Image: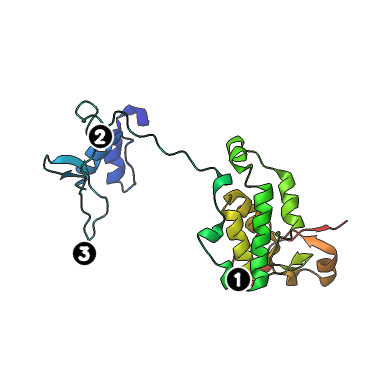
Amino acid sequence: MLATADADHWFSVLTAAGVPAAPLNDIAGGVQFAARLGLDPVTTVGPDAQPTVRHPVRYSRTPPSYRLAPPRSASTAPPFAHGSPPPLPERTPMSDLRPTETLFPLLDRVPTADAEWALRARRVVDEHVRATIDDDAELARFRHETVAAFAEAGLLGLHISGYGCAGASPLAYGLVCQEVEAVDSGWRTLLSVQGSSPWARSPSSAPSSTSRSCCPAWPVARSSDASASRSLPAAATRRR
């Protein structure tokens, strides 16, 4: 049915019926389309009145200014003063980045016990993640053995009390997540989402004997309503 007419026809029909729609455009077509809608998408800059795209947001008190004209086309652009343009800087490998302490010097301002957890996390990621994360990201490789290193350091379920977890403070948990996030978001996700959120379901819905003898694998419940959390089915795996 859609092949019976062009995009402009269907745009008119759909918008008249109150259906949000727009044709797929290239850059020039997108600017023309915005002009058709009365959005005034083009402004001019510089003594030559070069056209450029107008900022899409209008501010009543601080309207955007346009100080620099866009680059000209290759046929009219002046040559670079020193030949070829300078090369783009290379991406800094994770192994060369400094710890978060250089950006957020917090450890000297927090309780010693919390700072020690952060330093422990830093040692773990320095030893098991930092040196290989660039290659692992390119190859989409997940090192399962690193999970064991996080567990042995007590970083999984860090702020959970019981079940063999450390029961550290929320501050320590945040500092540990910061240290891991500074090296790789994926491992921070494992630490916080897979390592803590599934454990955070209220243990009051499980018998105390089960709580003592089983390692819970509760479904993730992000509802602020505790009763909604308790209504979810629970599963548990007995420790061997």
First in residue order: circle 2 vs circle 3: 2
Q: Count residues near mark 3 (Cα–Cα under 10 Å), then give few for <14, some for 14-19, many for 20+.
A: few
Image x and y of residue 175, in percent: 60, 64
Residue 232 percent coordinates (x, y): 68, 62
Amino acid type, label 2: Ala
Q: Is residue 102 above or below residue 168?
A: above
Find the distance from the CA under tag 2 to the CA under tag 3: 30 Å
Q: Is residue 94 above or below residue 62?
A: above
Q: CA distance from mark 3 to mark 1?
A: 42 Å
Q: Are marks 2 and 3 in contact (CB under 8 Å)?
A: no
Q: Residue shown at 72%/44% (left/top)?
A: 144
State the residue lying farthest toward the front.
Answer: 82
- State how far apart marks 2 and 1 are (Cα): 50 Å
Residue type, mark 3 in image: Arg
Q: Nearer the viewer, residue 225 or 179?
A: 179
The label nearer to you, 2 versus 1, is 2
Disc number for residue 28: 2
| Residue at image point 71% right, 67% down | 160
Other-residue count near label 2 (Cα within 10 Å), few / some / many at <14 / 14–19 / ≥20:
few
Quadrant containing the N terminus in the rendered view: top left
Location of mark 3 (residue): 61
Disc number at residue 146?
A: none
Which of the two labelled residues, at mark 3 and mark 1, occupies the earlier sequence position?
3
The amino acid type of the residue labelled 1 equals Asp
Residue placed most toward the observer, 128 or 85: 85
Q: Mark 1 = which residue?
A: 225
Farthest residue toward the left?
A: 47
The percent coordinates of residue 133 (x first, y second) are: 61, 43
Quarter of the rendering occupied by the C terminus: bottom right
